[in-house]
Image (cartoon, grey):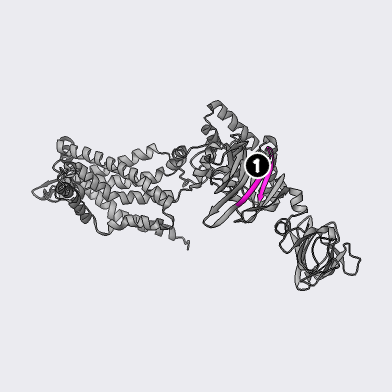
Amino acid sequence: MKGRWSGPLLLGVPTAFLLALFVLPLVSMVVLSFWRTENYHIVQDWNLGNYLTLATEGAYVTFLVRSLVMASLVSVICVVIAWPVSYAIILYGGRYRLLFTLAFAVPFLTGEVLRVIALQGLLGPLGLINGVLMALGAAPLRFIMYTNVASAIGLVYLYLPIVVTVIYLSLLNFDARLIDAAKIFGASPARAFFEITWPLNLFGTLIGFALCFIPCLSATLAPRFLGGPNGTLYGMAMAQQFGESGTWALGAAMGVVLFLTSILAVLAVCLKVDLRRTGFTGFGRG
Amino acid sequence: MYITLDGVSRQYGDIWAVDRVNMGIGQSEFVSLLGPSGSGKTTLLRIIAGLEKPTTGRVLIDGVDVTDLPPHRRGVAMVFQEFLLFPHRTVYENLAFPLRMLKLPKAEIEERVAWVVGILSLAGLEKRYPNQLSGGQQQRVALGRGLVGRPKALLLDEPLANLDRELRQEMEVEIRRHQIALGIPFIYVTHNQEEALSMSDRIAVVRRGRIEDFAPRTQIYDTPRTAFIAQFVGRSNRFEGTLDGAGMLASDCGARLAVPAAGLAAGSRAMLFVKNEKLRLDPAGATPAGANSLACTVKDVILRGAYADYILAFGNRELNASRPRSERAFLAGEAVTASFDAADMDLFDADGERPS
């Protein structure tokens, strides 16, 4: 079926969906961020106060920087772990490959809150690790008790499956015989990896990175349950504006800041990476 | 010998994909490994390349035992059926890759790439990416990447299988020309007998992991050593039957054929092959040209241009004859006599071996 209307229809439905459920809320959030909230009431009074607060109050700047550092670190760690894991599945998974990747999705079946609480039980003062250590007479590991390290562990745990899946899919589409070709023409295994395997899977790796980085930036659960007093992240602070403090306008401004930061990060990557050099062939015959 | 395979075998599970292969290949020889798919010819090539390790046996290149060397230390190059150009690199970068791995200075890399671009007429394509090239152009780049590093040997794994017929024949001539010009051995894997026959000095017929015969191409075609080769190389008519004491073969299809005096006992089973182009045709009633004659009816005529293929009905079976167009033409339905001499046939015993 390739009727006159099929094209507009197929593209129109998702467009309408995006407009209604993404663009409209985003616009309303942007509008709200230029208003103010007073005693749990929205006051339609155009001003830049929210942004001024975010830019000048130390705590918010700290939260943002901490979030950026945290998200970057967690994403890098995820990529570093995910690469060998995905590669091993491709190399040695044999006919169980699919099963291995599905196994990574098992934690998703329980829900994020449950997973974070489970991790709290593992890392906390009376948790499995420290409990065992203390029972054995050793000192508990303080750096995993309500700290940023614990938050990071939690975030890696939450987003690693996504990164593994994305890199696995990238490697699955990668023609491993190109490595043979590189070796025949004189590349050592390490050289072949950096000349061929890495660049041809860079695009997939970046998608995995982004799919970890962006949600980490606005993470609320992991820092709330695992992080300590110095563990507040931007997303968590934002959630508080909409919850306990009722300062929705400020929360909306924080949302806009997060959104712009994410876009900037993606743009920076796009400008740096020449898709053609990653074997991307979506340009057709030029 | 420049390249020596000494008792090379490769086992997968309990199957011997390559089985006790001994071969010697000369310094400037074009050798084809010809065999049906699954015969182990590609595995053999990958063993020479170092991409597979032989279970037993040794591989020597230029006097050096390379059995335990990884592919990147062997100094051989390869052209793949699927081209396997690096999709994220331009034509120039693909061609320069082997040279960069050799750590040659930039000026020499440029010079050598310019040389292959010249001999393979790739000028103007240097800045393109592989997906912007036609199949034929990709194949030329793959060939160029194989030649640019001046390898000790070039291994070709069905490099023309993905090209159309006309392009393939053009490339056959070209590949052979480059091989002669460079004076290095080319080892060419194919299941296509025409490719093997048109380019090779010698052909190794591979069957079930073993070398059935390794001989000059004319010998492989004209005097096949085994029934398998007779069947596989060229197109021929096969007769099976029992020998009687008077040097006649009573074939299962009802023909009585005079066979050359051979070391086969009376009463033993034998098979003989007559190449399609050796089967001569005369109108029924005329004196047949060959000593053995079979009365047939023309069933179909397939025009091939310079020659015509005739499908003949002989009793319950079909025979195939291929005759030049310069000869008398026959029409479907016509009665003809197919004939051939004893010298035109290849006789084998029940095990498919030539009687000695």
Q: Residue at x 32, y 48 (%)?
A: A211
Residue under label 1, please give it: B186
Magenta span contains residue B29:
yes
Residue A286 visible in the displayed image:
no
Magenta residues (range): B19-33
Q: B11 or A79: nearer the eye?
A: B11
Would you place residue B264 above or below residue B152 in this image? Answer: below
In the image, residue B208 lies in the stretch drawn in magenta: no
Q: Position of residue A242 (x, y in %)?
A: 15, 50
Q: Mark 1 lies on which chain?
A: B
Q: Label 1: few (<14), some or many (≥20) within 10 Å?
A: many
In this view, the residue in front, B268 or A284, is B268
The residue at the point 19 percent across, 53 percent down is: A117
Relative to residue B18, is residue A278 depicted above or below? Answer: above
Which amino acid is tagged 1?
A: Phe
The image position of residue A97, as x and y in percent, is 40, 55
Does A187 sit left or right of A155 as displayed?
A: right
Q: Where is residue B332 in the image (x, y as percent from the top left)?
A: 79, 68
Image spot of residue B103 (x, y percent): 52, 30
